[in-house]
Image (cartoon, rainbow, N blue to C red):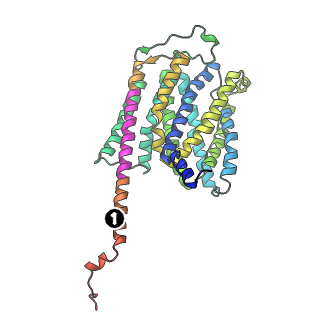
Amino acid sequence: MAAPGSSASIKRMFAVSEGAKLHIAMAIFQFGYAGNHVIMRAALNMGVSKLVFPIYRNIIALVLLVPFAYFIERKDRPTLTLSHLMQFFLLGFLGITLNQGFNLFGLDNTSPSFASATENAVPAVTFILAALIRLEQVHLNRRDGRAKVLGTLTSFIGASVITLYEGPTVYSPNPPSDQSDLMFALGDAKEKNWTLGCICCFGHCLCWASWIVLQAAVLKNYPARFSVYSFTCFFSILQFLAIAGYFERDSQAWHVHSVGELFTIFYAGLVVSGIGFAIQIWVIQGGGPVFVSGYLPLQTMLVAVMASIALSEEFYLGGMIGAMLIIAGLYLVVWGKSEETKLATAKDAIMLSSDNSQAGFPGKSSLVQPLLNSGE
């Protein structure tokens, strides 16, 4: 029988810090979301409706999340008010309805690698929005402040290059010999509206960044992450139903025609909308909005590898230059945020040390006080 001390040491040996848990969670999320880009493109090639697909996807996510919201947060859930419902409605419209809508229309007119590369602009946009509502501070007289501003400008330049300059083909893999039989056959974005695709992709980035920042604000007042996301999902389903009911009159668009379509719906609903964004909300509570967006370059690399191997996707010079500029800007923003956190931690440590030293010598202040009050 093991001694209590030895079991405690084993637990400490395999213990994972909270910071490490946040990193592991975001790495898992990016793996799942990278596959989503490729699978969503495959779903579009199969002819799924861009308005009906999100309805099924979010219904699956809602069915997955509601039991967790009910049983785990039943005792700790704050009282629900009309103000909370309005906030959840806004989160659903901005973070799911507009976000997923822009993503699908952008992906349909570009490619998985391009759509993923533009998402690296999310940290810069997140930083701007967080600074505007005072969740982030900008100190231009310090290195960290200048780095965050320079990173934001670099990301904007990269996004402009991607939008305005396509350039020649840099890499073109050999397509499969029998591409018509492949479930995930892609083809490029020729005969599509590239400019419209770029606008939609960056609209997706703006909505995603806004969603991350607003989630951080809402979770401070309503700290029940499963309930928040469940209500967000519910309202987005109602919004998509209203939009699709008006525009999608063809009954065939509401049918699932193949096993491949069913797989893409379940993957997007379970892995991304269900598990993935629940992870994102948890990490926002622990690491903040900028930390969440800092992992997007990992997704870009994974998507590029997946799309090249599975989908024979071509890479263009403009997209590669723009992606490198966006990633460089991202790292400047994240580095600036890291330096700011270090300075704040050091400042707090100094203040704590000063308070402790004063508490340890309570009689020190009497040495500089008169023995008798001046009025006596």
Q: Is residue 62 left or right of residue 18?
A: right
Magenta span contains residue 288: no
In the rendering, at what x and y percent does residue 375 appear? 28, 90
In the rendering, at what x and y percent does residue 372 appear? 27, 88
Find the residue positioned furthest to the bottom: 376
What amino acid type is highlighted by mark number 1?
A: Ser
Magenta span contains residue 342: yes
> Above or below — where is 288 with respect to 355?
above
Find the residue positioned furthest to the front: 1
One can see residue 290 in this view: yes
In the rendering, at what x and y percent does residue 202 appear? 48, 32
> Above or below — where is 368 with respect to 137?
below
Quadrant of residue 273 within the rendered picture: top right
> Above or below — where is 122 with respect to 135?
above
Q: Main secondary structure of the magenta part?
A: helix
One can see residue 196 in this view: no
Q: Write down the region rendered in magenta.
A: 323-344
Label 1 sits on residue: 354
Q: How many marks?
A: 1
Q: Is residue 353 left or right of residue 213?
A: left
Within 10 Å of disc 1 (Cα), the crowding (few <14, some 14-19, many 20+) is few
Looking at the rendered structure, the secondary structure element under dot 1 is helix
